[in-house]
Image: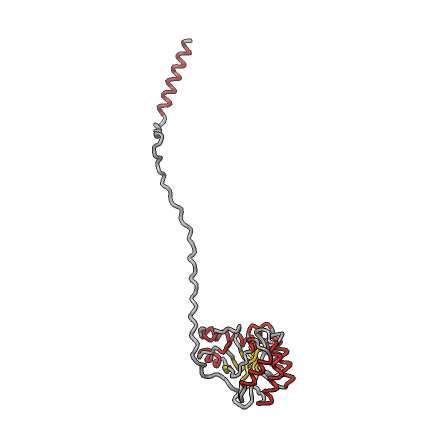
Amino acid sequence: MQARTVLASVLAVVLVLSGCAQPERTIAPVGAPQPVVPTTPPTPKPTASPRPTPTKPPLRPLPAKLPDGLRRSTGVGQVALTFDDGPNPAWTPKVLDQLRAAHVTATFCLVGREVQRHPELVRRIVREGHQLCNHSWRHDLDLARRPTAEIRADLARTNRAIQAAAPGAQVRFYRQPGGRWTTEVVAVAKDLGMRPLHWNVDPQDWSKPSAATIAKRIHAAARPSAIVLLHDGGGDRAATLAACPSVIADLKHRYGITRLR
């Protein structure tokens, strides 16, 4: 019994000495602020800055009057027929049929993207003896007001499409959509070997009046040397087509119809 007591006492002393060997720990009182551990903030990911929207140059103003250098008459007593905004598969072949039946020729002012869609019609126009006129790539009414480089690219692209459709065909003329000419587009057309082609008889068939109204307007406005503006594309041209036989007969009888030179 005494030996057990001694052993217990020795163990107690050992345990006390072991506890004294541990490093001293401080217990923070309840509610005390905890130490702040410094941290390195995350590096923000680089963000792509938005690309600035290119500023388009302002459109130049239209001149108060038509610029010099436009072809506005045939130069002879006879008159000329011109057809704009084609080629169109619904109307151009029918116009060509009427011209062939009347034994007259005309000038077709072609829109580049329509040429690209219907090259076979361009080949027929050339094959039947008609003349070709560049009418811009997409009938851009403001083309003449744009930078000169843009005008040149548009006209050159349209010429390439016409030449691809009818290799070797000559494109003698250029007509500005809407007749909205500037000196810049006149200069570019001439530089590309084309004569700027305007008109002096406009029945406004693009606004879709009746066939009788179209014929009446042309009869009243026509004079010797007139260049008549009509349309074989750009919309429903049923009224224009219906007016053509009487228009052609009237002009042939009064003045004769000629090919532009």
Given residues 24 and 66, the one toward you in this image is: 66
Colouring chosen for the image of the structure: secondary structure
The residue under the point 44% across, 76% down is 62
The quadrant of the picture occupied by the N terminus is top left
Is 57 above or below relative to 190?
above
Q: Residue at x 43, y 68 (%)?
A: 56
Task: Please say whether residue 238 is visible from this viewpoint.
Answer: yes
Q: Residue pushed farthest bottom? A: 77
Q: In screen coordinates, is 136 left or right of 18?
A: right
Looking at the picture, how far across and down is residue 179, in whole percent? 49, 78
Q: Position of residue 134 (x, y in %)?
A: 53, 78
Residue 163 visible in the picture: no
In this rendering, the answer to whether 53 lies above or below 23 is: below
Please report the residue visible at 52 percent of the width from the left and 89 percent of the height from the top: 75
- Residue at 56% in and 80% down: 230
Q: Would you place residue 174 above or below residue 38 in this image?
A: below
Residue 74's x, y, as percent?
A: 53, 87
In front of the other: 123 or 106 = 106
Viewport quadrant of the C terminus: bottom right
Q: Quadrant of residue 129?
A: bottom right
User: Residue 127: which quarter of the image?
Assistant: bottom right
Q: Residue 210: percent from the left, percent from the top?
A: 59, 78
Out of 134 and 248, give the one closest to the viewer: 248
Count every numbered label the image shows and give the total. Answer: 0
Location of residue 23 (image quadrant): top left
Given residues 96 and 224, the one toward you in this image is 224
